[in-house]
Image: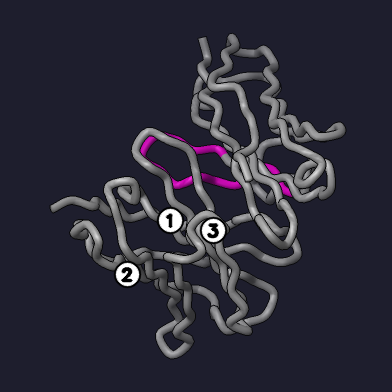
Amino acid sequence: QVQLQESGPGLVMPSQTMSLFCAVSGGSIGSSGYSWSWIRQSPGKGLEWLAYIYHTRSSYYNPSLRSRLSISLDTSKNRFSLNLTSVTAADTAIYYCARRPTVTTALDYWGQGILVTVSS
Amino acid sequence: QSALTQPASVSGSPGQSITISCSGTSSDIGSYDLVSWYQQFPGKPPQLIIYQVNKRPSGISDRFSGSKSGYTASLTISGLQAGDEADFYCSSYAGSGTHWLFGGGTELTVL
């Protein structure tokens, strides 16, 4: 059974950089056939796709946030991470990590999510 | 690119069928059979219920079905149950520039 678990600071100061991690168990992020995604959900709002990365380290970003986002893999720790720079209150959200098999192209396993609040 | 368009809310009585629409454009739903649907209960992460327009993951009830016509995808829930109350989101691939889009979400109320 694949499990994903987000971790990171629950509170980030405005203008700072947010760094989140997603630990994966029950499967290797270095294996082919999957991409690994970050999605966020602002309080009471809908879902917003942020970024995803393949085991080859090819990465793709939401065009509206591309200049502020960076996604990476750490195969030694079997986790992937997301950095979001120059945060504002508008970045306050629940951040989810998820797996997308290339054969189904849908997000089949999700983490429980981590609430990140941007505030001074 | 804008999010896909879903109705904010739908409702139905137990046993009835309801359909949630998801409207896109020629650049997303109209070009790819890569529409998926997710069900989200309060305080929980979304759960995949339909992928590639009309396929169900293992363990998902056959009361959930998906379809697509032109630029609009649809999720139908038959035999509505109280436990189906949740938010539902559609998603579609939108090409190599935008990549993935979500709909704004639809709140389902079982009367």
- Percent position of residue B1, x then y: 63, 46
Is residue B75 highlighted in magenta?
A: no
The amino acid beneath tag 2 is Ser
Chain of the residue where label 2 is placed in the rendered structure: A
C-alpha separation, residue under disc 3 versus residue under disc 2: 21 Å
Q: Is residue A106 above or below residue A77?
A: above
Q: Along the line of sight, which residue is nearer the eye, A65 or A117? A: A65
Q: Is residue A31 above or below residue B109?
A: below
Q: Are marks 1 and 2 in contact (CB under 8 Å)?
A: no
Disc 1: CA contacts within 10 A as few (<14), some (14-19) or many (>=20): many
Disc 2: CA contacts within 10 A as few (<14), some (14-19) or many (>=20): some
Say which label, 1 or 2, has the lower sequence index: 2
- Percent position of residue B105, x then y: 54, 32
State the residue position of label 2. Answer: A19
State the residue position of label 3. Answer: A109
Image: magenta residue range? B39-51
B105 to the left or right of B95 = left
- Percent position of residue B12, x then y: 60, 11
State the residue position of label 1. Answer: A96
B21 to the left or right of A50 = right
- Percent position of residue A102, x then y: 72, 66
Disc 1 on helix, strand or loop? strand
Rendered image quadrant of residue A109 = bottom right
Disc 3: CA contacts within 10 A as few (<14), some (14-19) or many (>=20): many
Chain of the residue where label 1 is placed in the rendered structure: A
Q: Nearer the viewer, mark 1 or mark 2?
A: 2
Chain of the residue where label 3 is placed in the rendered structure: A
Residue at 67%, 12% (x, y): give it: B16
Is residue B47 highlighted in magenta?
A: yes
Residue at 47%, 78% (x, y): give it: A72
Rendered image quadrant of residue A21 = bottom left
Say which label, 3 or 2, has the lower sequence index: 2
